[in-house]
Image (cartoon, helix red, strand yellow):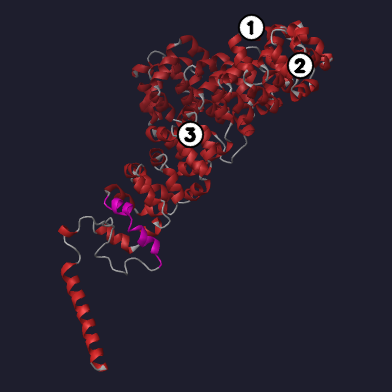
Amino acid sequence: MSMNNQKTWIVVAGLAVVVAGVAFLSNDFPPGSDQASGTIVPAERYRGAQISGDDVQLGDEGVALLMQTDVFELMIKDPEFRQLVSDPAFMVLAQNPQALAAMAQAPQAFAAMATHPQAFAAMATHPQAFAAMASDPQAFAALAANAQAFSADGMSAEGFAAQVFNADAFAAMAANPQAFAAMASQPQAFAAMARYPQAFAAMARYPQAFAAMASNPQAFAAFAKDVQAFSAAASDPQSFAAMASAPQAFQAMAKDANAFNALAASPQAFAAMANNAQAFSALASDAKAFAAMANNPQAFAAMANNPQAFAAMASNPQAFAAMALNAKAFSAQGFAAQAFSADAFAAMASNPQAFAAMANNPQAFAAMARYPQAFAAMARYPQAFAAMASNPQAFAAFANDVQAFSAAASDPQSFAAMASAPQAFQALAHDANAFNALAANPQAFAAMASNADAFSAMASDANAFAAMANSPQAFAAMANNPQAFAAMANNPQAFAAMAHNPQAFSALALNAQAFAAMASNAQAFAAFANDAKAFSAMASSPQAFAAMANNPQAFAAMANNPQAFAAMANNPQAFTALANQPAFMALATNASFSAMLSNPGFAKAMSQQ
């Protein structure tokens, strides 16, 4: 065979193979269902048959990949997802995946917060401060509802205390203790009076008329819209059944131009009484208490002259009640500025039983407050402290010779007063820091001996003493805040009131940033506090505040974009439902999620469902 013939046959053979292969593929591929057993078929991804290459913009490879995932295929068919992403405001929220992921930890709380964007922005800016306040939802709600009572300029804790602990206000309380005790017994009524002090001061100048109004406040509610009608009725009280019991008092009030002007300036006082009818009726039904209050126009004048101070008190009825019953103690000059230490109140709130035990023995507390480091050293060894407190005179000599105390504690069996707790005394003797604290303040031994009865009484109450002695943090707090606790020790009644209500007073003195934020958005917080469902969802969700505190930059950025909150506020149920779905969070936290929402390919995929 010639060379040319060989080449020809090779070409023909090659063509035959190609033709056979094409025929095979066209007839048998892909295999039919009867030939597919044992094969593995990839999971279907979203392909969008109608989407052209131009739909997914160039450079969006991440978007294209994201739209080919199982989670995308799942979520694109979810009606709640479709509802949420159809809201233009969601685009703003999606640009902050960190915050979005954090919100998923407490979706109901954030959805509730979103209905009050101004308040939300303030909380997002100061998450730690609001987290501390939210630990006491009732106090937080009261403060939020009375945000205008706080300075919009921002203030220190001491500044706030100075505002609340107004010298004139406390002088008035101290001078009219029965009047303010009566008010404190009905906090809702007091809060109403504190909001409109001038109007109630005018009423209080005519006690019988005031009693008639307080007994039947709903009968006077209509006058909130027509004060002239009140004046006309009071001029002829027999024509108005609710005034008939005190005609002379009402007639006198009608002729008092100053009283009428005060009522005309605050007609809401009538509505406030009607809205708190039960509280005012209860106040009026206690004749003695009401007389103590209504017959003290100075008390109402004080409220009118110090509206911010009394409004702040009204926001914390527990604290006000404690202060009203101990007004003289709290009015001591300089006490507020010294005693209101944020750290001191935090310590009291964290160790309420310990400080309550101290408050029950003011003389012993005063001694401990003078030498806090020394007593902190003793408290680290409760059994030794108990032995010393039970028999303080036996230890008095050590005030002049601390080395002798160390020697005796090293061999406690040789000193009778130490024999009951030998191991505790030996441990104390070997504690260099404790010994140095005692050596620096040996007068602590003498202070115990000088107040032997008080310390013995404290030690004899085993439960109370254990609560105190087993709380070294309490003594450490005293040592770190000596001025604050010394001021409290000089006012035992005030200290007792604070020690038994530490959380209430903490709400007053702590979180200056939060107060400033609330004051700057007073109306927003008042609305938020009055929205019981939303406020409860937020205040009872520590996860929400933890999420904000752990992502401060993300939430600070959101605070400048109210639209981000709108997406949740407009679709609370969808957001809450989706936040609990791992598929949604996997999609939403993807780096390409935000870009995907604005991509034409995503829009076309949405339209095809």
Query: Which kind of residue does numbered mark 3 sit on?
Result: Ala
Decide whether the magenta segment is chiefly helix, strand or loop: helix
Judged from the image, the secondary structure of the residue bearing numbered disc 2 is: helix
**Label 1 packing within 10 angstroms: few (<14), some (14-19), many (20+):** some
Query: Which kind of residue does numbered mark 1 sit on?
Result: Ser
Q: Which quadrant is the C terminus positioned in? A: bottom left
Residue 270 on image: x %, y %: 41, 26
Lower sequence index among marks 1 and 2: 2
Disc 2 and disc 3: Cα gap in Å?
44 Å
Disc 1 and disc 2: Cα gap in Å?
20 Å
Task: Work out whether residue 470 or residue 240 is closer to the camera in this orientation and state it.
Answer: 470
| Tag 1 residue | 460
Judged from the image, the secondary structure of the residue bearing numbered disc 1 is: helix
Q: Is residue 44 above or below residue 278?
A: below
Query: Which kind of residue does numbered mark 2 sit on?
Result: Ala
| Tag 3 residue | 144
**Image quadrant in which you'd find residue 375:** top right
**Image quadrant in which you'd find residue 40:** bottom left
Task: Work out whether residue 430 or residue 528 is closer to the camera in this orientation and state it.
Answer: 430
| Tag 2 residue | 444
Q: Is residue 334 above or below residue 40?
A: above
Lower sequence index among marks 1 and 3: 3
Disc 1 and disc 3: Cα gap in Å?
44 Å
Q: Is residue 210 left or right of residue 374?
A: left
Judged from the image, the secondary structure of the residue bearing numbered disc 3 is: helix
The label on residue 96 is: none
Residue bounds of the magenta highlight: 59-77
Lower sequence index among marks 2 and 3: 3
**Label 3 packing within 10 angstroms: few (<14), some (14-19), many (20+):** many
Residue 177 on image: x %, y %: 58, 15
**Label 2 packing within 10 angstroms: few (<14), some (14-19), many (20+):** many
